[in-house]
Structures are given as structure tokens and as C-alpha cells.
């Protein structure tokens, strides 16, 4: 039996009626979509886009891009965040203000 069937099995008649009403009103679909988006946001980057180090709780997150096209990126440390910001700054100075649609820049590894 899957998780959802188990949960439904444990509910009483009153709770089932309430859920049925939520389902018919489209609330459950909305809730599921919202949860999926939250999960996607949590997993948006598991490694630092600059040095590929796995991201932990101490990461620094930057939200950037124009309104409606906001993007988030987490960095392992301040120097990687700084490197990324400097890259954006340099590109803006060159008039290349299209970072949002471009792949994330990677720092060359030192030999
Ligand atoms: Zn890094």
C-alpha cells in the first residue's frame, strides 16, 4: 500500500468528507503544486556553481535577476560569492546584461 492510501485509511469519515471537498475545490492540487515548487527551490543547486563544492547549511544564497525572472544561487563561501558578483559586475560593464539566460560561470581550477 502506498503512503497516500495509508493516510486515507487512517482518516475518519468526517476528515474524508473535508478532504473530498478540498479536492473538488482544487485546493489539494494547489497545495501539491506549491510543495513541488518549494522542493525544487530547495534543490536548485546542491553544489557551489563556482567551485562545485557540495552546499551545506552554511552556504550563502544570492537572489538576482530582474523582477519576474529572479534566480537564486547558493555559494559555499564568501570568496565564491564574491567571484560570482565580480563576474556579473564585469559583464554589466561590458554591456552584457543577460546573465539570467546564460549558464552559470565557473571559475577555472588552479593546477
Ligand atoms: Zn565555492
Image: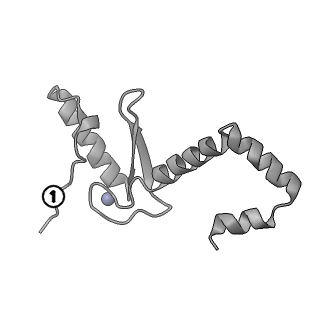
Tell me if residue 72 comes above or below residue 6 in the rendering. above
| Quadrant location of the N terminus in the rendered image | bottom right
Q: Quadrant of residue 5?
A: bottom right
Q: Is residue 99 left or right of residue 32?
A: left
Percent across and percent down for residue 94 are: 14, 28
Above or below: residue 89 compared with residue 44:
above
Point 37% across, 28% down: residue: 66
Q: Position of residue 104 (x, y in %)?
A: 25, 47
Q: How many marks?
A: 1
In this view, the residue in front, 22 or 104, is 22
Residue 92 image offset from top left, x and y in percent? 21, 29
Assess disc 1: are there few (<14), some (14-19) or many (≥20) residues with their C-alpha within 10 Å of its C-alpha.
few
- Residue at mark 1: 108
x, y percentage for residue 97?
A: 23, 28
At 74% from the left edge and 62% from the top edge, which residue is drawn? 8
Q: Is residue 43 left or right of residue 84?
A: right
Image point 23% across, 31% down: which residue?
A: 98
Q: Nearer the viewer, residue 13 or 107?
A: 13
- In the displayed structure, 71 sits above or below 50; it is above
Q: Quadrant of the C terminus?
A: bottom left
The residue most toward the bottom is: 1
**Residue sitting nearer the eye, 29 or 64:** 29
Q: Quadrant of ligand 1?
A: bottom left
Dot 1 falls on a residue whose secondary structure is loop
Q: Cβ(mark 1) to ligand 1 < 8 Å?
A: no
Q: Give the colouring mode of the picture.
A: one colour
Instruction: Indicate left or right for 1 with 78 as reference.
Output: right
Amino acid at each position: 500500500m502506498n503512503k497516500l492510501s495509508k493516510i486515507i485509511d487512517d482518516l475518519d469519515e468526517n476528515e474524508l468528507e473535508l478532504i473530498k471537498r478540498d479536492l473538488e475545490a482544487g485546493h489539494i492540487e494547489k497545495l501539491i503544486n506549491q510543495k513541488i515548487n518549494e522542493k525544487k527551490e530547495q534543490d536548485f543547486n546542491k553544489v557551489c556553481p563556482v567551485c562545485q563544492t557540495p552546499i551545506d547549511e552554511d552556504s550563502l544564497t544570492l537572489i538576482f535577476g530582474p523582477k519576474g525572472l529572479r534566480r537564486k544561487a547558493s555559494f559555499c563561501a564568501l570568496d565564491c560569492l564574491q567571484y560570482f558578483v565580480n563576474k556579473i559586475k564585469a559583464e554589466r560593464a561590458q554591456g552584457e546584461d543577460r546573465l539570467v539566460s546564460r549558464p552559470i560561470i565557473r571559475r577555472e581550477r588552479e593546477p
